[in-house]
Amino acid sequence: MRVLFLSPGYPTEMPFFCRGLAAVGAEIVGVGDQPDGALPEMARHALADHIQVPSLWDEDAVVAAVTAWPGARGFDRVECLWEPGMLVAARLREALGIPGMTYAQTIPFRDKEVMKRVLDEAGLRTPRHRSARSGNQARAAAEEIGYPLIVKPIAGAGSADTHRVDEPAQLERVIAATQHVAEVSVEEFIEGREFTFDTICAGGTPQYHNITWYRPRPLIARTLEWVSPQMVALKHPEQDELSAGVRLGLGVLEALGFEDGFTHMEWFLTDDGEAVFGEIGGRPPGARSVDLMNWACDFDAFTAWAEALCHGRISQPIERRWNASQIVKRAHGEGRIRRIEGLAGIMARFGRWIPSVELLPIGAPRRNWKATLLSDGWLVVRHPQLDRCLEMADAIAAELQIYAD
Ligand SMILES: Nc1ncnc2c1ncn2[C@@H]1O[C@H](COP(=O)(O)OP(=O)(O)OP(=O)(O)O)[C@@H](O)[C@H]1O
Ligand SMILES: [Mg+2]
């Protein structure tokens, strides 16, 4: 199997996927805008070759560079696991005559309005929604849908430019604040808890799936700086309460005709037990969520993905052993990190349940918490019992404090 892999060096998870591909016997050629020497060691080691392009986002230039490359005709797969590169990957498949998702099949994964229209046609529950390309269209959509509602870009990520709107005066402010966005989705606001439904598929069938619970809801986590956002990969995704979400997720995969690789769906569970679609990516979740799956099952999801892709199955045993929570910390104050408080006490109490601590070191500049999901670092805590896992995660969120000045 020869795989053309887009952006092998970035984001952080990509070298692990390259390593997984190499481990299952694939020959990998990377395409990226990093010079060979700047590639992380793990990626460099896994690659048979690397095609450097000036920019990954100039689709025509990437297609021209790859098709002109001497070995370009022998690929079996073109893979991109990073949201902004999905369409370039699809164009490369079409240019090289390689199976996998076409440009047209990729659009519903990238455009949140098209996405929801396809799912509506399949009879799946999406929030009521309208597309708006102007203030007037947004006002008309709001009139029709009613308040509260959500306004978000059709191609958003990282919750940037996603707004909750409770009344018309606020809508006017949001219209003004989203002038730079050409097209937005106006949606019914869904009350409830938020989860993911993530899969590794082969031939359209999930070979592995995961449900992660967001605590609190992402929109709240990115509005309040003092919050330590948690993601909890659940040991029991098969529990009754979540079954509506699993059914929805399987329906979504089928409606979108997804075949092979990672998917990442977000959905809402209302107090009435209804599962409502949020969004889906034809790629793995970011923010080290794949690591969290690994901590939950003590397996290697990167290699599992590679094996599903290359051989149509996952041979590693997958045992769901743990509820695993990632707790992201945000420093108090601006400038450089000077003090980390509470860590010793937390390690003394919960150390045996904490497999990973990845805090920024003293002296590092604190990060912009709005611009990066991982902020100033994170810990992972896990336990076979969900209530124990949540208790420890909440204690860590409350007691571990980072100070910058
Ligand atoms: N219809 C809705 N009802 C209630 N909350 C919503 C709705 N749509 C979005 N949100 C909130 O806004 C957050 C971000 O929305 P969405 O996931 O669609 O955008 P995004 O920019 O892709 O975000 P991210 O990359 O962080 O997942 C959601 O996780 C959810 O908390
Ligand atoms: Mg989202």
Image: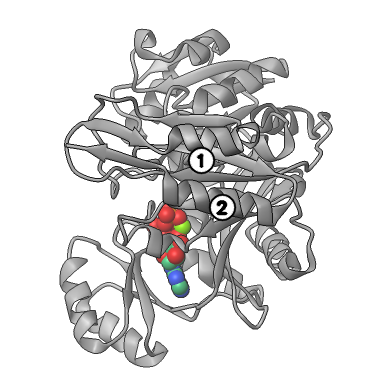
Can you give x and y, in whole percent of width and height, for residue 288 in the image? 51, 37
Q: Which quarter of the figure has residue 362?
A: top left
Q: Which quarter of the figure has residue 364?
A: top left
- Secondary structure beneath disc 2? helix
Q: Residue at x 75, y 46 (%)?
A: 384
Can you give x and y, in whole percent of width and height, for residue 356 in the image? 55, 30
Upstream in sequence: badge 2 or badge 1: 1
**What is the three-letter code of the residue carrying label 2?**
Gln
Query: Can you tell which mark lies on residue 90?
Result: 1
Of the pair 143 and 368, the residue shown nearer to us? 368
Q: Residue at x 44, y 27 (%)?
A: 7
Q: Residue at x 56, y 42 (%)?
A: 284
Quarter in which the N terminus is drawn: top right
**What is the three-letter code of the residue carrying label 1?**
Ala
Query: Can you tell which mark lies on residue 105?
Result: 2
Q: Which quarter of the figure has residue 153?
A: bottom left
Q: Are the residues tagged 2 and 1 within 8 Å (C-beta)?
A: yes
